[in-house]
Amino acid sequence: MNNKQTKNTLTGISIEDRWPAKNDDVLQLYSLPTPNGQKVSIILEEIGIDYEPHKVMLNDEGVTSPEFLSLNPNNKIPAIIDPHGPDGHPIALFESGAILVYLAEKSNMFYGKTDRERYEILKWLMFQMGGLGPMTGQLGYFFAFAGKELEDKRPLERFLGEVKRLLNVLETSLKDGRDWIAGDYSIADMSIVPWLNCIEQFYSADEETKLRSHKNVSKYMDRFNDRPAVKVGINIPAHSWS
């Protein structure tokens, strides 16, 4: 949507002052290919709707800029503006879990077919949002980033132990040849596996967590990562971490 339409229909949002849309009739994604960002680019690739990605860096020029804060006051990626919202008008959303649910409902895909199936998927989505994501993120800070310089290793031990516990939860829940965590492939899987990938690919903590020693989890990751939409979505917006 253009600047005039955005400001008239989504009061106070000036995101396009910094990240102008090339096609204002398609969904606008403001993100970076972190685990939380990958969730949304993956589902967008899976459902096949047109969208336009905008790279938002994790710095003062990106997530803490006034323009981005006008869309997400919590200064976190990802966020979206969909010009074709549920009532025919634009809608702005942040929080990756909320965006996953919205896009699954919008497309009628990857969110079960019955109330029982949807609650099962929602349960595992909340498992990631409330547990796996936050605990893995803290592990990354204390294992791979600034926190590793601390002499006191109790924070690292705390979060390493919690990530190991959560991996055991997944391992047990994927037993008996279960391909996906909540029945058919769903937004629960799109939410969980990017964080598992992060342990291995970004934090290099796979040995410490014994990630690949969890055979069911390891096969689960491989199944997910082999999907064509995942192979594309994991690096949108395109970015090199090197």
Image (tube, rainbow, N blue to C red):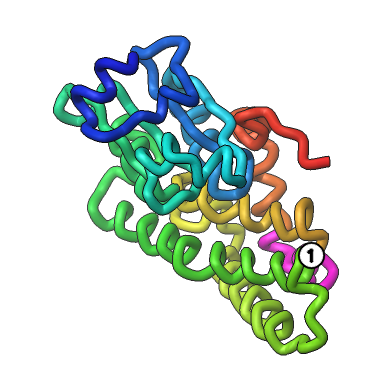
Q: Which residues are magenta?
A: 206-217
Front position in the image: 29 or 214: 29
Residue for badge 1 = 144
Q: Quadrant of the C terminus?
A: top right
Tell me the quarter of the picture where residue 136 sits: bottom right
108 relative to 122, above or below: above
In percent of the image, x 46 and y 21: which residue is there? 51
- Dominant SS of magenta comes to helix
User: Is 151 placed left or right of 139 in the picture?
Assistant: right
User: Is 50 placed left or right of 137 in the picture?
Assistant: left
49 relative to 128, above or below: above
Q: Is residue 207 magenta?
A: yes
Residue 223 image position (x, y, % from top left): 66, 45
- Single out the residue that lies furthest toward the left: 87
**Residue type, numbered disc 1:** Ala
Tell me the quarter of the picture where residue 66 sits: top left
118 relative to 65, above or below: below
Residue 159 image position (x, y, % from top left): 65, 78
Residue 202 image position (x, y, % from top left): 76, 53
